């Protein structure tokens, strides 16, 4: 037992000596190497920060030398730039690009003068859709403007003026030498031919209802049309030349203009010289009936045998209400009668349709009627 304790104590002493020797030779050396490693890592991880701090606050000779080298490099770069800018090859294009303000102002003035010479000096003032004769007298009584659309040849005829075609046709029929002049206008900001295309559009509307193509002349002009959101008023003027003096209407008789320019209603000749229809209405508006349809079918056969004859259809209204409203009702009714005739075989160029409004039809009883005359 004593030997066991003695051996254990000797082992402990021996182990302690070994640990002391190991610590002296290895632990101390490791501490020195770790210190050097940490210092080296600090220098390697933060070189930029250390350099910037040295430039700003350190005054050691080595730092000043580095700053002087940087300043010398900057000065050398500036000198090279100045050399490039002051060389002959660089000055030549700069001198050639010098702007003469007097020359530029002169050129601008010339361009402005050219623009003024090419521009219309008068402002376009749209007229209401009134058709005049060669003396400026009004042949129609429409006080509403047509509507045009920018770079669009379509001309929107106002609703109150929708019977202008039939009125023109009646004037042409009573004046065989008359000539319809359609003036179409366009803005300088539109296509160059837009004025002529607007005139052609209105011409097609007239020829479609039977106006003689040979009695229509088209003209166009450029005007300063004030478009707003692509829409403007006017764009079209119509004049009728070479009409009889008794067909012209003076300004003092505008209120009777619709009937004064037209011949009085007289009976025609043959079996269909005169027929008056008071049936076929729903309220104030004419829709036709079987008697009217049968009659115009008979007229169609008669016209085919008599190519020189035409059918005239007139619409009369009662006198209740506003005269202008009644005249427009008459237009609707006469257009319905005309449409029924075309549907039953009568060609459009052989129909003359006219609204008489509140005028007397010359018959007793209800004045609201459709009168059909072949002559």
Image (cartoon, rainbow, N blue to C red):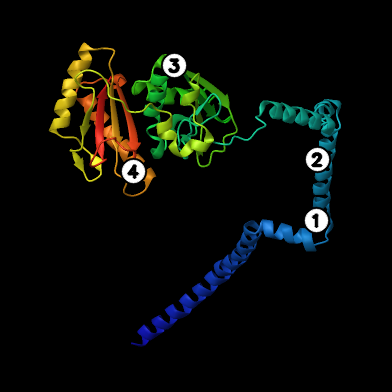
How busy is the neighbourhood of tag 4: few (under 14 within 10 Å), some, or many (20 plus)?
Answer: many
Of 99 and 374, nearer the camera is 374
- What residue is pinned by disc 3? 215
Task: Indicate the secondary structure of the residue bearing disc 4.
Answer: helix
Query: What is the spatial separation of the Cα atoms under label 3 and label 2, in whole angstroms?
Result: 86 Å
The mark found on residue 326 in the picture is 4
Between discs 3 and 1, the one toward the N terminus: 1
The mark found on residue 63 in the picture is 1
Give the x, y percent position of residue 245.
Answer: 50, 23
Between discs 4 and 3, the one toward the N terminus: 3
How busy is the neighbourhood of tag 3: few (under 14 within 10 Å), some, or many (20 plus)?
Answer: some
Task: Indicate the secondary structure of the residue bearing disc 1.
Answer: helix
Between discs 1 and 4, the one toward the N terminus: 1
- What residue is pinned by disc 2? 77
Task: Indicate the secondary structure of the residue bearing disc 3.
Answer: helix
The mark found on residue 312 in the picture is none
| Residue 70 placement, left or right of 303 | right
Labels 2 & 4 near each other (Cβ < 8 A): no
Query: What is the spatial separation of the Cα atoms under label 2 and label 1, in whole angstroms?
Result: 22 Å
Give the x, y percent position of residue 94.
Answer: 81, 30
Between discs 2 and 4, the one toward the N terminus: 2
Task: Indicate the secondary structure of the residue bearing disc 2.
Answer: helix
Give the x, y percent position of residue 71.
Answer: 82, 48
Labels 3 & 1 near each other (Cβ < 8 A): no
């Amino acid at each position: 037992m004593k030997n066991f304790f003695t051996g254990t104590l000797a082992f402990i002493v021996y182990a302690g000596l070994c640990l002391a020797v190991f610590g002296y030779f290895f632990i101390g050396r490791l501490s020195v190497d770790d210190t050097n490693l940490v210092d080296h890592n600090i220098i390697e991880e933060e070189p930029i920060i250390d350099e910037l701090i040295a430039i700003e606050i350190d005054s050691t000779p080595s730092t000043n030398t580095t700053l002087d080298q940087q300043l010398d490099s900057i000065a050398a770069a500036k000198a090279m730039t100045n050399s490039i800018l002051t060389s002959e090859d660089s000055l030549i294009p700069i001198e050639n690009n010098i702007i003469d303000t007097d020359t530029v102002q002169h050129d601008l003035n010339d361009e402005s003068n050219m623009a003024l010479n090419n521009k219309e000096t008068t402002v376009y003032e749209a007229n209401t859709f009134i058709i005049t004769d060669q003396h400026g007298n009004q042949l129609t009584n429409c006080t509403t403007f047509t509507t045009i659309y920018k770079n669009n040849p379509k001309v929107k005829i106002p609703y109150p003026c929708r019977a202008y075609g039939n009125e023109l046709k009646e004037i042409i029929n009573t004046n065989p030498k008359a000539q319809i002049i359609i003036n179409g206008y366009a803005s300088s900001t539109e296509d160059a031919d837009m004025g002529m295309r607007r005139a052609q559009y209105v011409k097609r509307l007239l020829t479609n209802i039977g106006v003689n193509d040979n009695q229509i002349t088209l003209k166009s002009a450029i005007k300063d049309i004030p478009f707003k959101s692509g829409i403007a008023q006017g764009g079209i003027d119509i004049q009728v030349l070479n009409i009889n003096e008794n067909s012209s209407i003076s300004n003092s008789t505008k209120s009777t203009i619709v009937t004064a320019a037209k011949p009085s209603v007289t009976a025609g000749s043959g079996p269909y010289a005169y027929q008056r229809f008071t049936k076929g209405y729903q309220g104030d508006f004419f829709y036709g009936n079987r008697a009217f349809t049968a009659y115009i079918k008979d007229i169609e056969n008669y016209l085919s045998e008599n190519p020189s004859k035409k059918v005239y259809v007139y619409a009369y209204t009662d006198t209740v209400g506003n005269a202008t409203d009644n005249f427009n009702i008459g237009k609707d009714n006469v257009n319905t009668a005309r449409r029924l005739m075309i549907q039953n075989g009568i060609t459009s160029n052989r129909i003359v349709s006219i609204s008489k409004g509140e005028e007397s039809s010359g018959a007793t009883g209800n004045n609201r009627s459709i009168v059909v005359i072949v002559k």
